[in-house]
Image (cartoon, rainbow, N blue to C red):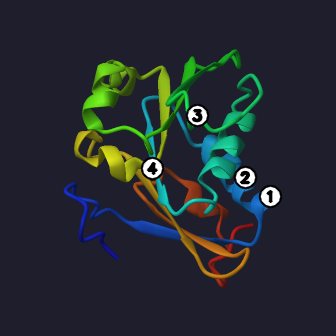
Amino acid sequence: MQNQKNPLSWKYMQTEFITQNFRETKELGMCLSKELSGGEVICLFGELGAGKTAFTQGILEAMKAQKPYTSPTFVIMKEYQLKNGKKIKKIYHIDAYRIEAGDLLSLGWQEIAMDKKNISIIEWANRVEKILPKNAIRIDFVWLGKNERKLICTNLPKIKKYAKKDKQEFV
């Protein structure tokens, strides 16, 4: 499945996960964090309430970022310092709902995204899509039911090993 509106080439292998609740969505973020080595840009797409922040909270918790883990809706960007002994020093959590690409560039986006000691997570990434790196991790959150959602992931490192092969559900 390829996003027709996306100006970038998201032709890489896709992996899909089904989560049933907040906890599973958060745990999937925790699983992804184990595969991050620094320099990743994680782009989250989906409707309001689809799980983007829960997923991000899982990454932040697993990487031992300092709490609280709240969406940067009004501040646009939150910077988390990491003291976990790894080469990753900062996680930037960006909410692009109220901004455009030029706004993100003025916040130092190019320097943040190019630094291999950073991880960047962007909610509402569709708003700034034209300045995202081609190798960015893309995760589309799609509602399937009241609590159930499908996460369609492109450019993932090794997270697919956490999926059940027979049911395509999150473990």
| Residue 126 seen in the figure | yes
Verify CB contact (< 8 Å) between mark 4 and mark 3.
Answer: no
Report, in whole angstroms, how far the alpha carbon at label 4 lies from the one at label 3. Answer: 11 Å
Side of 8 where 162 appears, left or right: right
Specify few, some or many for label 4: CA neighbours under 10 Å numbering under 14, 14-19, or 20 or more: many
Residue 72 numbered mark, or none: 3
- The three-letter code of the residue at mark 1 reads Arg
Q: What whole-number distance in Å separates the C-alpha atoms at marks 4 and 1?
A: 21 Å
* Rendered position, 154 above or below 86: below
Which residue does the image show at 64% across and 68% down from the upper left?
163
**Which one is closest to the eye, mark 4 or mark 1?**
4
> Residue at image x 47%, y 33%?
120
Report which residue position mark 2 lands on.
Answer: 26
First along the sequence among labels 3 and 1: 1
Q: For marks 2 and 4, give the CA distance.
A: 18 Å
Q: Which amino acid type corresponds to the residue marked 4 in the rendered image?
A: Trp
Label located before the other in sequence (2 or 4):
2
N-term mark: 4 or 3 = 3
**Residue 88 visible within the image:** no
Q: Earlier in the sequence, mark 3 or mark 2?
A: 2
- For the residue pair 46 and 28, the one nearer the viewer reads as 46
The image's mark for residue 36 is: none
Q: Residues within 10 Å of mark 3 (few under 14, many from 20)?
A: some
Q: CA distance from mark 1 to mark 2?
A: 5 Å
Give the Cα distance between marks 3 and 2. 17 Å
> Which residue is denoted by mark 1 in the rendering?
23
Residue 46 screen position, x and y as percent:
49, 62
Q: Quadrant of the C terminus?
A: bottom right
